[in-house]
Amino acid sequence: MTEKHWKTTWEPGMWQSMVFSFLAGVFGANAIPHFVKGITKEPFPTLFGPSPIVNVVGGWAMFLLAGSLVYWAHVDRNAAAAAASGALGVLLMGLFHASIGAFGRRA
């Protein structure tokens, strides 16, 4: 009778790579308008008000979160799926900002 050897470390699967990469794309794409509007001192709506300082900090935090999600996605193990999922997240956030935006369409 042979003894079963169980893995002692958990390895991420393709779904983790896809979900984390998608979210990284969403947060990374959403960080761009907030950060840019903040450093150009233009108002841009957030949950905490349209202040440039709030936008810079919010954009910076979203960039950090996006980078962390890319790290946790282990994109080297599922490169094609991670790249496609991340690109889809960027596209969807871009379409969101180009259409209705966070607080509805402006006139």
Image (spheres, grey):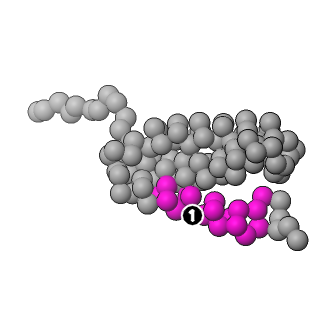
Residue 67 visible from this viewpoint: yes
Query: Quadrant of the rendered structure where residue 71 is?
Result: top left
> Looking at numbered disc 1 in the image, what kind of residue is underneath it?
Leu
Query: Quadrant of the rendered structure where residue 57 is?
Result: top right
Q: For this view, does 57 lie left or right of residue 2?
A: right
Q: Is residue 93 magenta?
A: yes
Q: Is residue 101 above or below residue 45?
A: below
Assign the magenta stretch its main secondary structure: helix
Q: Position of residue 11 (x, y in %)?
A: 35, 38
Q: Which of 85 and 67 lies nearest the eye of the viewer?
A: 67
Segment tinted magenta in the rendering: 85-102
Dot 1 alpha-carbon crowd within 10 angstroms: few under 14, some 14 to 19, many 20 or more: some
Q: Residue at x 39, y 46 (%)?
A: 75
Q: Residue at x 88, y 71 (%)?
A: 107
Q: For this view, does 72 lie left or right of residue 90?
A: left
Residue extending farthest to the left is: 1
Q: Position of residue 41 (x, y in %)?
A: 80, 43
Q: Position of residue 101 (x, y in %)?
A: 76, 62
Tell me the quadrant of the picture where the N terminus can be found. Answer: top left
Q: Residue at x 60, y 41 (%)?
A: 63
Q: Residue at x 34, y 30 (%)?
A: 9
Q: Position of residue 87 (x, y in %)?
A: 49, 59
Q: Dot 1: what SS?
A: helix
Residue 15 visible from this viewpoint: no
Q: Is residue 53 above or below residue 84?
A: above
Q: Which residue is mark 1?
A: 91
Q: For this view, does 78 lie left or right of residue 66?
A: left
Q: Is residue 61 magenta?
A: no
Count of marks, rendered view: 1
